Image: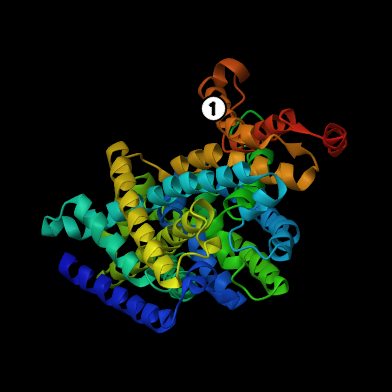
Amino acid sequence: MSPLLLFSFVIGYFLILLGVAWHTGRNSNNESFFIGNRNSNWILVAFGMLGTSLSGVTFVSVPGAVAKESFAYFQVTIGYIIGYITIAYVLLPLYYRLNLTSIYDYLKTRLGFTSYKTGAFIFIVSRIMGATARLYLVVNILQDAILQSFHVPFWATTIIILLMILLYTFEGGVKTIVWTDTLQTTCMLAGLIICVVYIMNNMHMGFADSIQAMNEKGFSRIFVTDPNSKLFFVKQIIAGIFITVTMTGMDQEMMQKNISVKTLKDSKKNVLSLGFILAFAIFIFLFLGGLLYLYAAHENVTEIGDKLFPAIALHHMPHIVSVIFIIALISALFPSADGAITALTSTFCIDILGMQRNTKMSEVSKKKMRQRIHLTFAFVFLLFVMVYKWIDNQSMIGIILKVASYTYGPLLGLFSFGILTKRKVKDILVPVVCIAAPTICFFIDKFQKEIFGSFEIGIELLVINGTLTFIGLLLVSKSEKETKNQAR
């Protein structure tokens, strides 16, 4: 299909997003940008967050990993559901009771000022690395499919995409994203279903026939029962629980959408419905992965991993399906990138600069500062995407989960310590603990064969990291009784 025609559809889709952004961003202020004036509809938030949770990596990497790992990723998804229940009944009540704009304010209230700044900084590092990895994957596909034909270099393609995101998030922030995410999630899921239906019709298979064919190829196995394997179901489910609790419940990007909902009751409904809908969507992605490998064998397609779905959709399907794939892919990209830049801007303004508490700055000055920071993070995204281009890994989902294991572990330890204990930490030592724990995890991961033999550590490294942080905080803390005795 003509790259020019594909590009025209991309531009048309983007103009629709701009129209939505203009309509929702009118009369927006800093409160609108940060938390949507706490007036977001929970149904829209839940549906839009589905797109943020899935992202372009899920769209491409989860189907691509089926040949290697079968449906084992669904084990993690079972953990996701348990994690969302934990968020709904443990973390959300806490955030609403404290009436937080930034969830890291909790760390200041419970542990201290240095802990608060440490948590916010960890989130910034985590979100930059994770979001730019997701962004790189989709930009790389768009580069190969469209812009390379116009001799546009990769860095310029990245700038074009970032400019698109900036244009529709610059004013409205969360208030706009709640609506644009809903549109994008709709397009992404529609593209997923259309691709599934097309392949099944083309191969003259029903659902039962497809599952049987996948069974024969070994694609549809869900549960891995070997305790030594990194895909062992107990490890995967536990990891899924903690991934959700940290990457959603302790993540400002995800939670600023939740706390933009008016009431705690509606916010709980949002999170719980998201968990079950997400599980269903991921199963469809895995099912699509099995279909893609069956179709690839039928059409003699040799690509694997992240390159499989784009290769089939763009070169082995009708033009209309190629267009749908590109729109769906962009729809998977934008929710993960636009929300990340917005959340990073919010965290830096509120938690690092303390803008909300600065009574000397006018609202106009705050808005100008916020917009400059928004632009700065877009530039940071550009730099990180170029780094990932240089690395050029075969499966970005592996990189993202590995990064999360290192960066979200300290957040897990900080929040868990604050919620589960009443001990007082020596606040100045908290950054040392939060650096030491992932450093130890790096060596555990690097030398795991020498330490554990055939026992493999996978994404449960996140739990180990959080546990080490928790232990470190215990070592630099005192009980309430000890604190009172010292005060005397």
Instruction: Assign a secondary structure to mark 1.
Output: helix
Q: Position of residue 270 (x, y in %)?
A: 64, 70
Whole-percent x, y for residue 467 in the image: 68, 34
Dividing the picture into quarters, in which one does residue 2 lie? bottom left
Extreme residue toward the left, this view: 151
Write down the quadrant of residue 484 in the picture.
top right
Whether residue 70 is visible to the viewer of this picture, yes or no, is no
The residue under label 1 is: 439
| Residue 127 makes an appearance in the image | yes
Q: Quadrant of the C terminus?
A: top right
Q: Amino acid at mark 1?
A: Thr
Q: Residue at x 56, y 63 (%)?
A: 256
- Between 103 and 487, the residue placed more toward the observer is 487
Q: Nearer the viewer, residue 358 or 56?
A: 358
Position of residue 87 measured from the top left corner of the image (x, y, whole percent): 69, 57
Picture coordinates of residue 16, whole percent (x, y)? 33, 79
Q: Is residue 1 left or right of residue 465?
A: left
The residue nearer to you, when weighing 31 against 226, is 31
212 relative to 467, above or below: below
